[in-house]
Amino acid sequence: MLEYSMLYPENTETRTAIRLDGMWKFRIDWDGKGSSEGWEKGFRDMR
């Protein structure tokens, strides 16, 4: 039963496979200010 339960990366009418490999930039939003400062648009001062 479990051998058929995996979702494999394939495009269908209701699902799109998206590549997520590559470099990512993460920052923990301890103060909860990420949305108000536009973090979803990216970081300028990332080291």
Image (tube, rainbow, N blue to C red):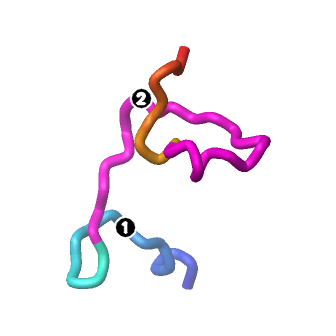
Which quadrant holds residue 10? bottom left
Q: Is residue 29 magenta?
A: yes
Whether residue 28 sits left or right of residue 35 in the image: it is: right
Q: Identify the residue under disc 2.
A: 23
Magenta-drawn segment: 16-38
Whether residue 9 sits left or right of residue 45 in the image: it is: left
Residue 9 locus on image (x, y percent): 33, 63
Residue at (38, 46) in percent of width and height: 20
Residue at (47, 72) in percent of width and height: 6
Q: Identify the residue under disc 1.
A: 8
Residue 41 locus on image (x, y percent): 41, 43
Q: Secondary structure at mark 1?
A: loop
Q: Earlier in the sequence, mark 1 or mark 2?
A: 1
In the image, residue 45 above or below residue 20: above
Q: Nearer the viewer, mark 1 or mark 2?
A: 2
Residue type pointed to by label 2: Met
In the image, residue 38 above or below residue 9: above
For the residue carrying disc 2, how many other residues have a C-alpha within 10 Å: few (<14), some (14-19), or many (20+)?
few
Q: Could you tell me how far apart the alpha carbons at marks 1 and 2 are, in whole angstroms?
A: 23 Å
Whether residue 23 sits left or right of residue 29 in the image: it is: left
For the residue carrying disc 1, how many other residues have a C-alpha within 10 Å: few (<14), some (14-19), or many (20+)?
few
Whether residue 44 sits left or right of residue 21 in the image: it is: right
